[in-house]
Amino acid sequence: MPYTHNDSIDGKHARITQSSSPLGELFDHGLDSWTASIFPMSIFSIFGCNSGDSALAATTMYSVTCIVLFTFMLSHWEKYNTGVLFLPWAYDISQMSMSVLYILTAVVGVDTFHKPLVFNFYMTHVLITFLVGCSLLISVPQTVHNIFRGYNQKTLLKPSLYEGLLPLLSPSLLCFLLSIWVAYSPCGILEKQPRLFLWMLGVTFSNVTCRVIISQMTNTRCEVFHWMLFPLILLVGAAVSGLLGQVEEITFIAFTLLTTAAHVHYGVCVGRFVQGKQLSKHLNIYVFSIRKRYAD
């Protein structure tokens, strides 16, 4: 809840103190891209996994997380094409709903959610319907509408359909590869390590999103293939073919550690680069300070 509160007021505080900058956008939405997978995982922990009719299957958790991450990505894909970041109401509704769910859990306990509401309809069904509904009925239509409006008004920033769709290529391939792994894993990797698998998905997706954010705010071309896809292709191929055998789970854990370390390293290096070299001087700011380098 403190994160939700601070995430909602940081932009307003920056505007009041006249310290808004693309760097702030990167840190704000870069962290959001990571927490977009952590929040659903915390909700899944409330309901449990494979513990009766009221539980969520691991495959359902994975599918919903992919939908949530893609919904977050669509807003930045929209800005990549239109130059305007529009966050649908689904984002605010989801944060408010999570806060209510956490408070309700603290008051009544988790056992309440394992009792049917009406007609054998559990709270988990409400959760899935709500999350998927917000994405498909609010976020996606709004993004498509804004893209088409920009196309009709001839204000899109990208010259072709290929260039406009380029930011969606890497996240689509990421989910495609992981879905193949989930479906054909000899050891059932998702069922064995559900939280760690969702963590790896979130970290990798966050790194892809951060690079899109940097491309959009610097008005540069998005990369075609994210580098993490190359080792992932080899890993998924070796896993589903049975080549890894009994070391599939250990290899997966090692890959998860690699992606997490790479993502943290990327964030640290971007911060150092910005602070010491170009963007902070160009923007006339100090990192993590509202004091400017010199008077206007």
Image (cartoon, helix red, strand yellow):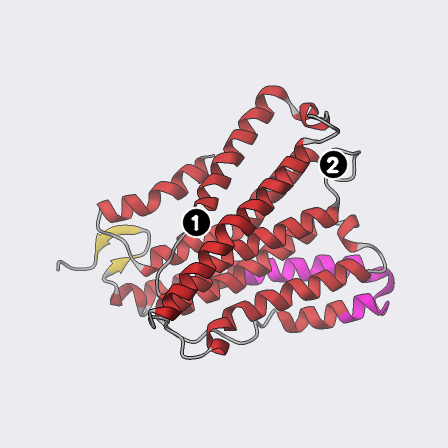
Residue 242 is left or right of residue 22, and the answer is right
Residue 21 image offset from top left, x and y in percent = 29, 58
Q: Pointer 1: what residue? A: 88
Q: Residues within 10 Å of mark 1 (few under 14, many from 20)?
A: some
Tell me the element at label 1.
loop
Question: In which quadrant of the rendered view does residue 296 lie?
Answer: bottom left
* Residue closer to the observer: 158 or 239: 158
* Residue closer to the observer: 86 or 248: 86
Task: Tell me if residue 156 is in the magenta stretch.
Answer: no
Q: Pointer 2: what residue? A: 55
Question: In which quadrant of the rendered view does residue 157 lie?
Answer: bottom left
Which of the two labelled residues, at mark 1 and mark 2, occupies the earlier sequence position?
Answer: 2
Residue 29 is left or right of residue 45, and the answer is left
For the point 74% across and 33% down, which residue is it? 54
Q: Kindly tell me whether residue 35 is visible in this rendering.
A: no
Residue 188 image offset from top left, x and y in percent = 82, 54
The amino acid pointed to by label 2 is Ala
For the point 72% across and 26% down, which residue is it? 116
Tell me the element at label 2.
loop
**Does 295 appear above or below 61?**
below
Q: Are marks 1 and 2 in contact (CB under 8 Å)?
A: no
* Residue closer to the observer: 146 or 278: 146
Q: Residues within 10 Å of mark 2 (few under 14, many from 20)?
A: many
- Pick out the residue farthest to the left: 296
Task: Tell me if residue 248 is in the magenta stretch.
Answer: yes
* Predominant SS along the magenta part: helix
For the point 50% across and 62% down, which residue is it? 209
For the point 80% across and 66% down, which residue is it? 239
Start-end of magenta stretch = 237-263
Q: CA distance from mark 1 to mark 2?
A: 29 Å
Which numbered mark, 1 or 2, is in the foreground of this view? 1
Q: Kindly tell me whether residue 176 is visible in this rendering.
A: yes
